[in-house]
Amino acid sequence: MKTYTLNEVQDKLIGTIGSPNRDKFEYELQMDMIGNAIKQARKEQHLTQEELGRLVGVQKAQISKLESGAGNSTIDTVMRVFSALKAKVKLQIELPATSINVIL
């Protein structure tokens, strides 16, 4: 029986790194992870979606969409949500000749 690495399986089923399908998959996975982190932090602080929305200045529906990974949200909204949850956010951007680290 032939065995495959996780990378080989991902390349075959999702697409190679840099392909549109793989980029879409990676984006959706990241948004899902961000949504889960928001939901977990909100619940740990005993906040409802409506209460968090009030703190951030958005509707409950926007918090619900963020938590479920549905729809598009601006980085500003995501940052305001994490700020309201008193979370430390690190943003790392790597370009070919430059690396930028921002801690918010």
Image: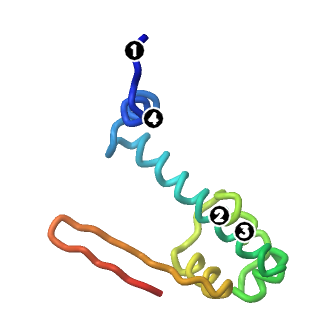
Secondary structure state at the residue bearing disc 4: loop
Which disc number belongs to residue 62?
none
In this figure, which residue is indicated by the disc labeled 4?
14
Q: Nearer the viewer, mark 3 or mark 4?
A: 3
Task: Give the class, few, some or many, for how many residues have Cα within 10 Å of label 4's Cα (few <14, many ≥20).
Answer: some
| 4 or 2: tag closer to the N-terminus | 4
> Residue 6 at what x, y percent from top left?
42, 35
Callouts 1 and 4 close, C-beta under 8 Å: no
Which disc number belongs to residue 40?
3
In this figure, which residue is indicated by the disc labeled 1?
2
Q: Is residue 62 visible?
A: no
> Residue 24 at what x, y percent from top left?
47, 47
Image point 47% across, 87% down: which residue?
A: 104
Q: Nearer the viewer, mark 1 or mark 4?
A: 1
Secondary structure state at the residue bearing disc 1: loop
> Residue 102 at what x, y percent from top left?
38, 83
Judge from the rendering whether residue 79 lies leftward or rightward of residue 22; answer left or right: right
Secondary structure state at the residue bearing disc 2: helix
